[in-house]
Image (spheres, grey):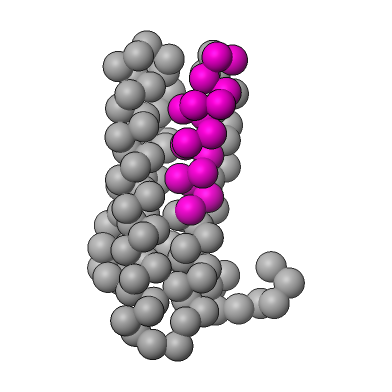
């Protein structure tokens, strides 16, 4: 944001930003008793996607960059599993998850091409 580094120009970084925002929005729909469990885990995973893209893009070697992009992709998989549990537990219905599902798939595809 302030530094104007290369990661802010990456399409995957901008999609990850949208993913974070959508995850935070959806967490408002979960019950209060999940505030310190599933809600926090999903928020951390979503932020991890974006932050690891930024950190990875700042590394000089391809090997280092790929490692952070792999971590980011793993966090996308974590989000997928967490939302699966939200549905199974009856906290969210699939119709509320269309946008986040598209973002998860797109982000995962893009990160897979980068690793």
Residue 97 lies left or right of residue 34; in this view the side is left
Q: Is residue 86 magenta?
A: no
Q: Main secondary structure of the magenta part?
A: helix
Magenta stretch, residue numbers: 32-48
To which quarter of the image does residue 66 belong?
bottom left
On screen, 2 above or below 95? below
Q: Is residue 46 magenta?
A: yes
Where residue 67 sits in the image (x, y, percent)?
Answer: 34, 71
Furthest-bottom residue in this view: 60
- Which quadrant is the C terminus positioned in? bottom left
Residue 102 lies left or right of residue 9; in this view the side is left
Furthest-front residue in this view: 36
- Which quadrant is the N terminus positioned in? bottom right
On screen, 43 above or below 49? above
Q: Residue at x 32, y 38 (%)?
A: 80
Q: Nearer the viewer, residue 7 or 61?
A: 61
Where residue 54 sits in the image (x, y, percent)?
Answer: 52, 68
Where residue 56 sits in the image (x, y, percent)?
Answer: 45, 73
To which quarter of the image does residue 73 belong?
bottom left
Q: Residue at x 51, y 70 (%)?
A: 55
Residue 113 lies left or right of residue 82; in this view the side is left
Q: Residue at x 53, y 34 (%)?
A: 40
Q: Can I make out residue 28 in this image?
A: yes
Q: Nearer the viewer, residue 112 or 106?
A: 112
Where residue 68 sits in the image (x, y, percent)?
Answer: 39, 68
């Amino acid at each position: 944001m302030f530094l104007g580094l290369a990661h802010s120009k990456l399409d995957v970084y901008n999609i990850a930003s949208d993913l974070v925002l959508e995850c935070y929005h959806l967490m408002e729909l979960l019950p209060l008793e999940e505030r310190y469990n599933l809600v926090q885990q999903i928020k951390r995973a979503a932020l991890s996607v974006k932050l690891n893209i930024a950190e990875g893009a700042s590394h000089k070697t391809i090997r280092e960059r790929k490692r952070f992009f792999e971590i980011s992709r793993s966090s996308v998989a974590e989000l997928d599993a967490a939302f699966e549990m939200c549905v199974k537990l009856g906290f969210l219905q699939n119709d509320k998850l269309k946008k986040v599902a598209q973002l998860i798939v797109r982000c995962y595809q893009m990160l897979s091409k980068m690793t």
